[in-house]
Every structure is written in structure tokens, then in C-alpha cells.
Image: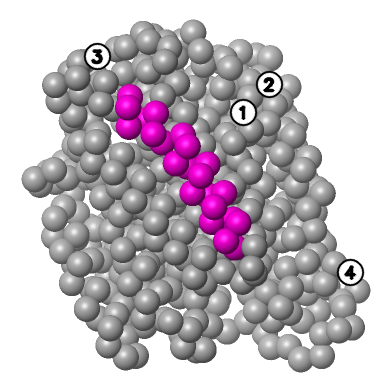
Amino acid sequence: MMKFLFMMIFMIPLCFKKNMFWLVQMLMMFMMFMFMNSTINIMNFCNLSYMLGYDMISYGLILLSIWISSLMIMASESLYKNNFYSQLFLINIIFLMMMLYLTFSVMNLFLFYLFFESSLIPTLMLIIGWGYQPERIQAGMYLLFYTLFASLPLLMGIFYVYKNMNYMMIYFLKFYDYNLLMLYLCLIMAFLVKMPMYFVHLWLPKAHVEAPISGSMILAAIMLKLGGYGLLRIMIILQKINLKMSFIWVVISLIGGFYISLKCFCQIDMKSLIAYSSVAHMSVVIGGIMTMNYWGYMGSYILMIGHGLCSSGMFCLSNMNYERLNSRSLFINKGMMNFMPSMSLWWFLLMSSNMAAPPSLNLMGEISLINSLVSWSWLSMIMLMFISFFSAGYSLYLYSYTQHGKYNMGIYSFYTGTSREYLMLMLHWLPLNIMVMKIDYSMIWF
């Protein structure tokens, strides 16, 4: 595990040299394939080094982190073209990738907290340094304060666990089961804000709208998954108390998911619509984790991976329109099918994955989560029905609004997609739909 960390550290000096932008991106891809070929044991933690190791959950999320990091560089060609601090940008991304890699692979609960919070800093720098509008400062503050407000209790909770258990290894948490309400709230709240759960979700649309494309991609693909990963890990020691309290989070999530789905129809900014749809998807994931059954755990994990690829691809598409029209407004981005018919295909493919059409990972995850929630309480079927229906609704709404209709006469110069952009979309869509073939890796963790 340390070898990949060293590889990332040794990539930093490359960033200071000129014309190394694409080399760093290729090295990330290379590292991704090396990591993909490392051994994986479905049962236990494997590839252990001093304080690092991974099991099945970490493995998929580390792969996703490295994959999305390389695609972030690919999506940010305009920075390189305009020479807008592109070297600093590369260092920032490598630092962010290191933090995420360590968050998912570290075995110590306190170190997990440390890297979990430090991944916030490069994200904040991305938003404030490379964002588009002056409001990005406010968005950065939202992101910082929402996250920090909830994460101090988490630190206190971790110290309490250490005081009682005298060790911090995640693997050994399974020997304890706490029945304390305050500890439960302390440990769980930071992850629910990061997910984000409805009521504490306001930072997400703000951060997305102000972030550059790379910031949006990493926020949608990885940052929201940190919360889910934390919940999956920490639920082991909170089983008794969660049996009493879980209905609160499931109810908030399902009703919030329904309300957010309706909110998607009110958006006029493409990025904002995609960001709100992320909140709706993540609400089902929270519900699945809180039911604490096998289907819920598996489904939430699969939906997290699927949503990471799908949402990131959709942000790429909205950015491509933004680079051509300098606007993300739905009123201006109309009739794109006339200009970029081949791009319309990618819009359609990613939108259909977003509404959980086969053969995407999202479908597999949603089937599993619906199973889990309905077995927990059949009343949840009502809200799940609405969420599923409206997820198809706002995906089609976004697709038909941007692709169909009479195009804006203000567009006087235009160019179609470049091969880099098509490759980037292909690299989002292919794993999202091909990984269903090997779903046993995600579903069978006996």
C-alpha cells in the first residue's frame, strides 16, 4: 500500500516542470491500472503495510478516487491552454488524491478522521482558486463551516471510543457495541453532513455551482462517498442504539429525497440540477445503510460507486456546454442536438444511467436498496416510488430541455466535441455499465 503513496509523492516534483500536464495524467492512469491488478481478498483486509490496508469497500473507493483524479486533469484542459496556474492545479489534485487514498486505506480510526478532514483543504483551494464567480468565497465558507461544525463532535466521539477500547484499529471495532445516544449522535453527524443528508445539504449545491469542473467532479464522485464510507465503518459499534434510532434518519432521508426531487424541477442552472439530484440519490443510500441489513449495505456501496461515475460524467457534459456558450442556464443551452448530435448521445447515455436504467450500476444499487428499505418497512415503498419516478422525471427534463427545442440565436460561433471530451465521457460511462458484469465483487462479501 505504501508503494502507491510513494508514487503519488514522487509525482509532485513533475508538476514544477513545464509541459508535464498530460504526463501527470498518464501516470495517474498507469497507477490506477497497477492498483487494479493488486490482489484483493473479499473476506479480510489485505495488502497490509505499516498502517494501511484495504478490504472490499476501500478497494472500490480507492479505485474510484484515482480514476476520477485522472479524469479531472483531462477535463481541465482549458486551465492548461490558458496557463491559469496549471502547475499549482496539478499539485493540488495530487495532494487531494493522496488525502483520499489515505482516508480510504488507513486502518486507524483517528487517522481516518485526520485525512477525512484534510481532504477538505485541497477541495476548498480548488473552489476558491479556480472557481468562476465572486460567490465562490461564500460557497467555500458554507463548505468549511458545515463540515467543521459537525466534525468536532466526531473527534470527541473517537477519543471516547479510544478511552474505552484502548485501540483504534477499524478491524477490531466489531468487538464492541455501544448503546449511548450522545456518542451515537457525535459519531454519525459528521458523516450525515458529508453525505449530505436533507436539512444539512445546503452547502452542496452552493459548492457545486461555484466550483470549477474538477472541483465539481471530485465533490460529486468522492466527497459525498466519504460520508457513506464513514457510516459503513462506524455502524459496527453502534448497532444496538441504531436499532432504536434508525427510523429517524430513514424518514428524513426518504421525505427529503422526495422533496429534493421536486426541487430539481425548479432549477434553471444545469450544475445546480445535477447537484440536487446527487442529494436525492444519496438520501436513498443513507436509508439503505440505516436499515443495517445485507442488501442495504451492498446496495449503498454499489450506488455510491455508480453515482460517482454517473454524476461526474454529467458535470463534464454541463461543463462542455459552459465552455462553448459561457452559460449554464437551461434557457440558453437549448437545442444542442442541432449543434452537437454526437454529444446528445452521451447526454442520453449518462442521463439514462442517472435514472437507473439497465445495465448501469445505479440500477443494481437501487434494486438492492429498494429491497432493503421495503423489507425494513413496507410504508417506505410510497416515498421510494416517488423518488424513483421523479429521478426519471428530472433526468428527462434536463435532457429534453438541453437537447431539444429551438436553439438560442445568440450563439454565433461554435465547435463540436473534441476527441479528448469523447474519450473522457467514454471513461465515465464504460466502467459504469461494464462493472455490472462482475457485480459479484460488490455483492458477495461473505
Q: Quadrant of the C terminus?
A: top left
Left or right of 55, for residue 292: right
Task: Mark 1 vs mark 4: give the one in front.
Answer: 1
Q: Which residue is mark 4?
A: 405
Dot placed on the residue nearer the N-terminal end, 3 or 2: 3
Dot placed on the residue nearer the N-terminal end, 1 or 4: 1
Mark 3 → mark 1, Cα distance in angstroms? 27 Å
Numbered marks: total: 4
Label 4: state its secondary structure. Answer: loop
Q: Which residue is mark 2?
A: 381
Residue 370 or residue 182, whichever sits in front: 182
Return the mark for residue 253: 1
Left or right of 393, for residue 437: left
Residue 203 placement (x, y as % from top left): 59, 47
Mark 3 → mark 4, Cα distance in angstroms? 59 Å
Q: Amino acid at mark 1?
A: Ser
Mark 1 → mark 4, Cα distance in angstroms? 35 Å
Q: Amino acid at mark 4?
A: Gly
Task: Mark 2 vs mark 1: give the one in front.
Answer: 1
Mark 3 → mark 2, Cα distance in angstroms? 33 Å
Q: Which residue is mark 3?
A: 176
Residue 359 or residue 91, whichever sits in front: 91
Question: What residue range appears in magenta?
Answer: 136-157
| Disc 1 packing (10 Å; few <14; some 14–19; many ≥20) | many
Mark 2 → mark 1, Cα distance in angstroms? 13 Å
75 versus 234 height, above or below: below
Q: Is residue 151 magenta?
A: yes
Tell me which residue sits at (65%, 79%) in the image: 323
Tell me which residue sits at (68%, 31%) in the image: 256
Residue 259 placement (x, y as % from top left): 74, 34
Label 1: state its secondary structure. Answer: helix
